[in-house]
Amino acid sequence: MERFNAAFDGGSRGNPGPAAWGVAVLDAGGRCLERHAGTLGRATNNVAEYHGLIEALRLATQKSASEVRLRSDSELIVRQLQGRYKVKHPDLKPLFAEAKRMIAGLALFDIRHVRREDNKEADALVNEALDRHEADPGTAVRIHDVREPKGG
């Protein structure tokens, strides 16, 4: 796979609080092909968002993608990666550095800010992971779901 498209999200219930990330791997038409999510323990929304970004980049690397296009409803994360906002919070600096290291190996990287309603699949994954964690608080949650492509 040369091109990789995904939407990612992260969130916490409480800020900080129980946190999770979600990544929806998309086809060229925006349909979800794979669902990935996981819990982080206690973290802030922004830390969870960065974990979603890093997981999306990790998935792209696993698929040997050289062109990566991501979308997120986190204006902060998108603008920091674009160099429009500075990374000031000490918890975000190592996550930002890791993301930039991963991005540096790509031929093309594009990240877009979208409205929350345009990031529903990734948002739903975050909430699914958090719901599963609340049902069994002693267990870390990891979701990996590959969907069969629909014929057309």
Image (cartoon, rainbow, N blue to C red):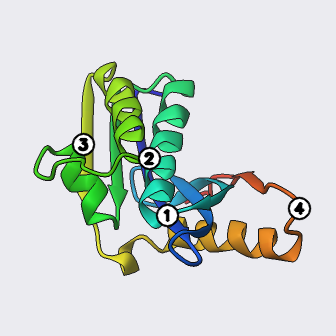
> What amino acid is at disc 1?
Thr
2 or 3: tag closer to the N-terminus: 2
Say whether residue 106 is visible: yes
Q: Which residue is mark 3?
A: 110
Whether label 4 touches label 1, CB < 8 Å: no
Amino acid carrying mark 3 in the image: Asp
Distance from the alpha carbon under mark 2 to that under mark 4? 25 Å
Q: Are marks 2 and 4 in contact (CB under 8 Å)?
A: no
- Quarter location, residue 113: bottom left
Where disc 1 sits, the SS reads loop
Residue in front for this viewpoint, 151 or 24: 24
Q: Earlier in the sequence, mark 2 or mark 4?
A: 2
Give the Cα separation between the discs numbered 4 and 3: 37 Å
Quick one: label 4 or label 1, which is nearer the N terminus?
Answer: 1
Q: From the viewer's perspective, is the residue at label 4 or at label 3 nearer?
A: 4
Label 2 and label 3: CA atoms lie apart by 12 Å
- Looking at the rendering, in which quadrant would you find the C terminus? bottom right
Nearer to us of marks 2 and 4 is 4
Q: Secondary structure at mark 4?
A: loop
Task: Determine crowd level at label 2: few under 14, some 14-19, many 20+ residues with C-alpha closer than 10 A.
Answer: many
Could you tell me which residue is drawn at 41 percent across and 60 percent down?
46
Q: Which residue is label 4 attached to?
A: 138
Vertically, is 6 above or below 127? above
Numbered-mark total: 4
Compared to residue 145, the image places residue 68 above or below, namely above
Q: Residues within 10 Å of mark 1 (few under 14, many from 20)?
A: many
Q: Which residue is mark 1?
A: 44
Residue at the location (61% across, 57% down)? Answer: 151
Residue at the left extreme of this rendering: 84
Question: Percent from the top left, x then y, of residue 80?
Answer: 22, 49
